Image (spheres, rainbow, N blue to C red):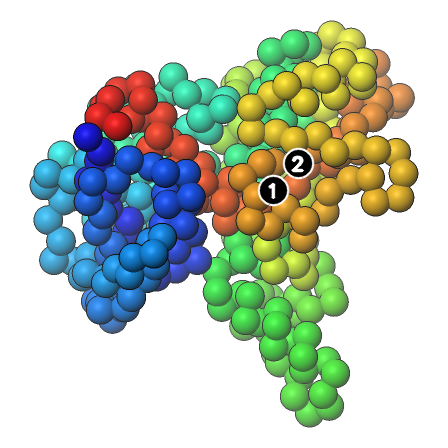
Amino acid sequence: MGYRIVVVGATGNVGREMLNILHERGFPVDEIAVLASRRSQGTEVSFGDRTLTCEDLDQFDFTGWDMALFAIGSDATKKYAPRAAKQGCVVIDNSSLYRYDRDVPLVVPEVNPEAVEGYAKKNIIANPNCSTAQMVLALKPLHDRARIKRVVVSTYQSVSGSGKEAMDELWDQTKGIYVPGQEVAPKVYPKQIAFNVIPHIDVFLEDGQTKEEWKMVAETKKIVDPAIKVTATCVRVPVFVGHGEAINIEFEDHLDEEEARDILRESPGLLVVDKREDGGYITPVECVGEFATFISRIRQDSTIDNGINLWCVSDNLRKGAALNAVQIAETLGNRVLKKG
């Protein structure tokens, strides 16, 4: 016996990836519905070898459906997620709307799977920010061994994190640079993204952080440990898919780089590729389409007593969004609903 599953926002990058991953992982689906806004009603999307037709989200009745994977913006989620939850369908939400709600669990299944059991307060589970999801996979097993005091992270985030329009902007700007008179002005981003990097993701806050940086701080505390101090600089780079992160970790206890490497090798969701030679590391282009988050460049930080540096890359449309949502659905099914 399987589940009745709804994918909301099925025509977007993340929604389509959710459908791909549900099929790839053999999620026990008895029935599936795909929803989109009224203007996308009738659009066809693929689910394995099947073609599904999108229904109008506004008219859909969630009664009798087990789980709904939401891949729409916060404004639409605010309208439709409570309705789905009230009608008895568990919402797994990819937006930022519920991540900081005390009554909504924020879950990375390899890190805090037990948190899904708190879903019943609002019938909603939140998916973390893409940059946070991959980072906490690396932090949690190291924290369990040596207790993390402080994390300094710089991100190198691909344009797919901003959606299809951002990917188009990078493509068009790149082409325009080589064709005089066909330059493309920035629309999605405040400055040119082609052949450039932009140290600005999401809105600026009063203290000088951007909201993306604040998210990494708040979400790491909620998922791993509120005692961990985190400071982040989030940068958009001219890469289509795949986020990179340079992470500096300070521990309470000494942790040798070899032991850290062994711990990470044995941790779920991670693959360590760490050879001290040319090309002995993973880059964003190599992680696209992969389920794993990759760890490279593990080394001692000699400037502090108990420090480790590492490089972390992941497909942001997968672990940073769609894959984690499907894993939450799997965890909820295995620990609570127990149908599949």
The answer to whether residue 332 is above or below residue 291 is above
**Residue 158 at least partly seen:** yes
Disc 2, SS: strand
Q: Residue at x 49, y 24 (%)?
A: 110
Q: Quick one: label 2, few (<14), some, or many (20+) residues within 10 Å?
A: many
Query: Viewed as shown, does residue 66 lie left or right of 96?
Result: left
Which residue carries the number 2 mark?
Answer: 294
Taking the view exactly as shown, the residue that stands out farthest to the front is: 49
Q: Are marks 1 and 2 in contact (CB under 8 Å)?
A: yes
**Residue 102 at least partly seen:** no
Quadrant hosting residue 137: top right
Taking the view exactly as shown, the residue that stands out farthest to the bottom is: 181
Quadrant hosting residue 216: top right
Which residue carries the number 1 mark?
Answer: 314
Query: Viewed as shown, does residue 310 lie left or right of 78?
Result: right
Query: Viewed as shown, does residue 325 lie left or right of 320?
Result: left
Disc 1, SS: strand
The answer to whether residue 52 is above or below residue 282 is below
**Picture coordinates of residue 213, whole percent (x, y):** 58, 41
Q: Quadrant of the N terminus?
A: top left
Q: Quick one: label 1, few (<14), some, or many (20+) residues within 10 Å?
A: many
Q: Residue at x 57, y 71 (%)?
A: 169
**Picture coordinates of residue 293, whole percent (x, y):** 61, 36
Nearest the eye: 195 or 209? 195
Nearest the eye: 332 or 82? 332
**Amino acid at pointer 1:** Ser
